[in-house]
C-alpha cells in the first residue's frame, strides 16, 4: 500500500508520543484541571501530554525536549500532579477497554495467557556467592 496523502495524514505524528485524534479524545476527560481558584490555565494540556509521552517513548530527558513544548518546570509540575491524583492508574483501564473496542473485541477479555520463559545456564558455572 503506497503512502498517499490519506494514509500519511492518518498515521503522521509530529513527535514520538503525539496522541492521535481518537487517542486524545479518550485522554481529554482525564486531563481536566481541578483547580477552582486562581488564574485560569493558559498551558495547552495536549502539549504537556505530548511532551510526557515523547519522554516515555524515546527515553530522552525533559530538558532536552524541543522548544515547541511547554517549559520544563511546567511539564514537571503537571506530571507530578497527575501522578499524585492517580491519573495514570485511572487512564490505563480506559485505554485497554477502548483499544479492545476499536478492534471490535469484547471490552473485557474472557481468558488470559501468561507465558513464562526460563533460561538455561551451563553446569560449569557452579554455585556463586
Image: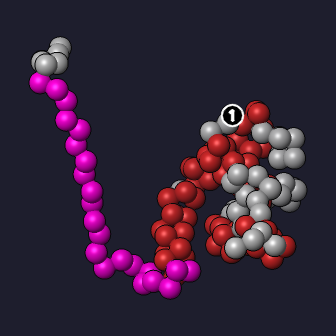
Dot 1: what SS?
Answer: loop
Task: Find residue 5 and report its image quarter.
Answer: bottom right
Identify the residue at horizontal 75%, vertical 71% (top origin): 2
Q: Nearer the viewer, residue 85 or 99?
A: 99
Which residue carries the number 1 mark?
Answer: 61
Residue furthest front in the image: 1
Query: Which image quadrant: the N terminus?
Result: bottom right
Q: Write down the region rendered in magenta.
A: 102-123
Identify the residue at horizontal 49%, vertical 77% (top origin): 100
Residue 78 placement (x, y as % from top left): 70, 49
Residue 104 placement (x, y as % from top left): 50, 85
Residue 51 placement (x, y as % from top left): 73, 48
Can you say whether 82 is above or below 12 in the image?
above
Residue 28 lies within the magenta run: no
Q: Report the number of discs.
A: 1
Determine if residue 1 is in view.
yes
Q: Nearer the viewer, residue 120 or 23?
A: 120
Amino acid at each position: 500500500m503506497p503512502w498517499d496523502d490519506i494514509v500519511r495524514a492518518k498515521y503522521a505524528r509530529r513527535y514520538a508520543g503525539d496522541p492521535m485524534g481518537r487517542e486524545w479524545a479518550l485522554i481529554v476527560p482525564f486531563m481536566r484541571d481541578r483547580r477552582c481558584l486562581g488564574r485560569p490555565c493558559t498551558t495547552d494540556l495536549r502539549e504537556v501530554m505530548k511532551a510526557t509521552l515523547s519522554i516515555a517513548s524515546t527515553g530522552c530527558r525533559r530538558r532536552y525536549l524541543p522548544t515547541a513544548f511547554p517549559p520544563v518546570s511546567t511539564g514537571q509540575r503537571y506530571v507530578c500532579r497527575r501522578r499524585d491524583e492517580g491519573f495514570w492508574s485511572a487512564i490505563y483501564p480506559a485505554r485497554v477497554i477502548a483499544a479492545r473496542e476499536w478492534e471490535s473485541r469484547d471490552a473485557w477479555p474472557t481468558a488470559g495467557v501468561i507465558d513464562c520463559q526460563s533460561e538455561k545456564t551451563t553446569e560449569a558455572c557452579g554455585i556463586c556467592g
